[in-house]
Image (tube, rainbow, N blue to C red):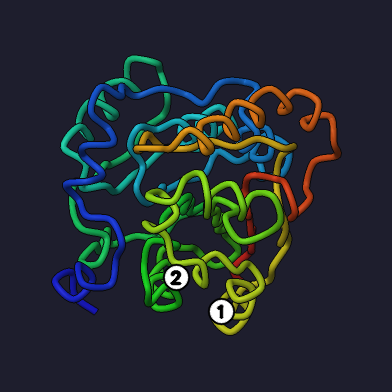
Amino acid sequence: MNSENQEEKTMISRRQWDQLYTGVNPHTAPEKDQLRKWLEEHAPRSSGSCLEIGCFPGRYLSVMGRLGYRLYGVDLAEKLPELEEWLSRENFNTGTFWQEDFFSFDPGMAFDMVLSLGFIEHFQNWDEVLEKHFPLVKKGGHIILEAPNFTHGVQSWIHRTLDRENYLQHFPEAMDIESWRKVLERGGFEVIFCGYAGRFDFWVQAQERGILSRSALTILRYLKPAAALLPAGNKLYSPYAVVMARKRA
């Protein structure tokens, strides 16, 4: 599996990622961020090493730093050096940051925690991509995988109809957490959590929309505070699909 072949199997290019990050500076996810809350509640605290795949702008990698980890990252983003500098200024314990292609990436070490957030669902051969994560996890270490919940209930409707351009940058079959579970268990991992995170929330990317779509978004934004009172962790409306697993010793 080489990087040239991967270009044909992904729905979003490096150029598009760099465009998305235009004007974005390194930062930590706000305290109310639903995925941050999940990580703070469920991720084991440790003084060990944490690698994030696709780490810019560091919004969740820095959360892991607050949980005690020494931080590492790999990303092709042009602004990756800014992230490393920012983490150092903020007094996080940092290791190496590799500005290279994940599919030719070989750090020569394994990590206590590997974060892969919003990554594998952009690849048609998502199972091969997931398996490439496995050697990066130490025996007894953990991996946390996340993708947006674009495949169930109201979340599916929002993104299929009101966020179509963003939706088409993802492979729906690559966001099936039960399929992730099977690949992980086959690869020698014990699945600790397999479910959905957060109360109702949604986001959409900028695109051309007709008056009906704009009206629907206005109504959804108006209803969001009330809908956010629903219990967290429901596949029909929670915004994140998450799996955490431990590599068997």
- Label 1 crowd (10 A; few <14 / some 14-19 / many >=20): some
Local SS, label 1? helix
Q: Is residue 46 above or below residue 137?
A: above
Q: Residue at x 68, y 32 (%)?
A: 37
Q: How many marks?
A: 2
Displayed quadrant of residue 56: top left
Local SS, label 2? helix
Residue in front for this viewpoint, 153 or 96 = 153
Q: Residue at x 56, y 21 (%)?
A: 30
Question: Which residue is under mark 1?
Answer: 183
Q: Position of residue 174 (x, y in %)?
A: 49, 69
Q: Which mark is residue 57?
A: none
Location of the N terminus by quadrant is bottom left
User: What amino acid type should be assigned to the residue bearing mark 2?
Assistant: Leu
Q: Which numbered disc, 2 or 1, marks the residue that appears first in the sequence?
A: 2
Q: Are marks 2 and 1 in contact (CB under 8 Å)?
A: yes
User: What amino acid type should be assigned to the residue bearing mark 1?
Assistant: Val
Name the residue furthest front.
211
Location of the C terminus by quadrant is bottom right
Q: Residue at x 42, y 66 (%)?
A: 133
Q: Residue at x 74, y 37 (%)?
A: 199
Q: From the viewer's perspective, is 221 left or right of 165?
A: right
Q: From the viewer's perspective, is 109 left or right of 175?
A: left
Alpha carbon separation for disc pair 2 and 1: 8 Å
Q: Is residue 99 above or below residue 3?
A: above
Q: Position of residue 128 (x, y in %)?
A: 39, 78
- Label 2 crowd (10 A; few <14 / some 14-19 / many >=20): many
Question: Which residue is under mark 2?
Answer: 130
Q: Position of residue 141 (x, y in %)?
A: 57, 59
